[in-house]
Image (cartoon, rainbow, N blue to C red):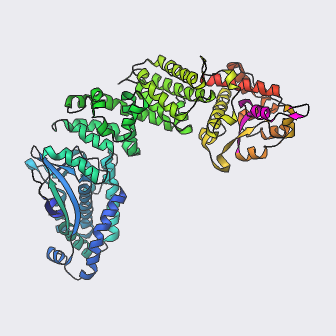
Amino acid sequence: MEIVPSKQNISELFASTSFHIDFYQREYQWTATDVQQLLDDIFYTFDQAYPENTSLDPNLKNVSSKYPWYYLNTYITNKTDGQLFIVDGQQRLTTITLILISLYRLCEDYGLTGLRDWIQTKIVGIGVGGAKQFWIAHEKRHIVMEALMNNSESAAESISGITGKHMIENFQTIDQYLKSKISSKHRLETFIYYFLCMVVIVNLDVPDTDVPMVFEVINDRGKKLQPYEILKGKLLGEIDKSEVDGFADIWESSLLDLEESDKEDVDTFFRTYFRAKFADNRKLAQNFDGPYHRTIFDERTTGSLFLESDAMSVKEFLRGPFRYYSKLYIKLRDLSQNESATIPEYYFISQLNRMDGHLMLAMAACEVDDPEEDAKIVAVGRGFDRAYVALQLNRAYDSNQFQELLYSLNPSLRGSKAEQIEGIIDDAVINEIKARRNSESTSLIQYSQFKQVGYGDYNPTFLRYFLTRIEKYVANGMGWSMQDSLYNYVRGIGKSNAYHIEHILARNDESKSLFTSDGVFDETRFENERNRFGALLLLKGQDNQSSKAEPYKDKLRTYTGSAPYLAQSLVANFYKSNSAMKTFEEESGLKLAPIDDFSLEALEARSELIYSIVQKIWL
């Protein structure tokens, strides 16, 4: 079928036709930058002509003959069941309507009753049956449009929805812009004629059969839509238009929080969901890295999703998995961004260690409307954190191998009970340790291995994370608050926030004497022993610098006062009148004690203490 372009000015565009917002369209998401760019472009051509024509009466004839026209681009429509739907261009058409409303209100300020009434007919008219009808017709917008026209947008600010929020924000931008550019009655009248009669837009009307093709071509060649926005069109396109609005509501309400915070987070949700449910290894998961809105309809996944040309499956997907897992993802994301007293591991993993695989595992483990949802979330968080630390302490961690391990867990976690999850993860980690270390170990962490690792085996971030978790355990055990935020302990930068690794055994003659026999200094043993976890602490930047080469007794002065509790636990005064420590020791079964002389025996005892705390935290 031939597509014939139709040229219109704004007055002709909004005259008698109601434009319905097609489900292929994204929400109204233009930003203030987009709106201002449009206004700048329109006023650029207007301002070139206006200074030469200030003496002319503002009317259609004068403006038409003296002012250049401005091309506003193209919009695409599709007629279905007697209604005209916008396939592409609703961002521009909505913004034009907001400009008209602002001009309508300016006319009231300047007493231009006739022009105000003319503009009103370009915003709203009489529809079928005599009902009031906005030309940009969508019932969810009516309250906002009415409020803007009546100069009462504050009444509509509480209305939820991305479109309503952006309409109000952009109207305020437009209103401020026009008031700054229009300073006289003459200029306002002239601009109204210019905007309504000299701003031109071209319409292309396409048949139903060509809409999906046109929509994808527009996206490929024009301003890119996000994959989820194209997926929305594909899925809702399977549903009859007589019932599509209800499912569009499910889509919008489910993704509202994600879209408002970060549009890219919506695509992250879909990719995480598809990997969790349909990827059993890293190679399969990579199918969802790119344009997943195409991948899910190919032969590799249609056998699982059943969404291709199947309206019933699409409706079941939207009512069930989509609704549930989008809500679950938001819950998991919030746990990852804000430390929870009951499920802190998600914050540890995301913010302190910058990983996100736990979100996929939690979604793999949970079923739709899962009654064990909270218990499974806890189990995945604990299992993931333990897996990461155990692999590190066994020197069996590799970031690429860890990703492979996570994807291999997906099929085992699907359909599992909450009580099984940690065991499933632990077993996989033990097998990974066996393979990586060529050992027959049947436990996650053994002291024989733990005593061999330390400072030289890890990057600074893991060392700070590991020691911070020890510090947190001691602080919580005493019922005391941490002296700084977890984030600063692990990720802080600069002189005021950064923590560094402190070697209790400094490189000085006192420490070296512990490793000297018959006048021969054992450099290798010295390095191995001073780098063990039992000989390491966290200190804030300047404290660490000042204590570097001090004898141990002088270091003890640095370890007092505001130093982290693990450092203070080496100092005798820390235990005086410290009932919280006594209670902690009684309840935990641990024995912390001051160390006046950091001998090799003291180092071994301190290492065994740290290992015991490791068992309390992670095993």
Q: Position of residue 83 (x, y in %)?
A: 12, 47
Q: Is residue 53 magenta?
A: no
Q: Residue furthest front?
A: 438
Please report the residue visible at 75 percent of the width from the left and 22 percent of the height from the top: 591
**Up-down relation of residue 446 to residue 553 (above or below):** above
Q: Is residue 124 visible?
A: yes
Q: Nearer the viewer, residue 90 or 481?
A: 90
Q: Which residues are magenta?
A: 516-540
Residue 585 left/right relative to 411: right
Instruction: Name the quarter where the C terminus is drawn.
Output: top right
Q: Quadrant of residue 188?
A: bottom left
Q: Is residue 525 magenta?
A: yes
Q: Position of residue 123 (x, y in %)?
A: 19, 57
Q: Quadrant of residue 597?
A: top right
Q: Residue furthest right?
A: 518
Q: Nearer the viewer, residue 553 or 334?
A: 553
Residue 441 left/right relative to 315: right
Q: Is residue 117 visible?
A: no
Q: Position of residue 569 (x, y in %)?
A: 76, 31
**Up-down relation of residue 42 to residue 443 (above or below):** below
Q: Nearer the viewer, residue 437 or 334?
A: 437
Q: Position of residue 5 (x, y in %)?
A: 13, 59
Please report the residue visible at 75 percent of the width from the left and 46 percent of the height from the top: 545
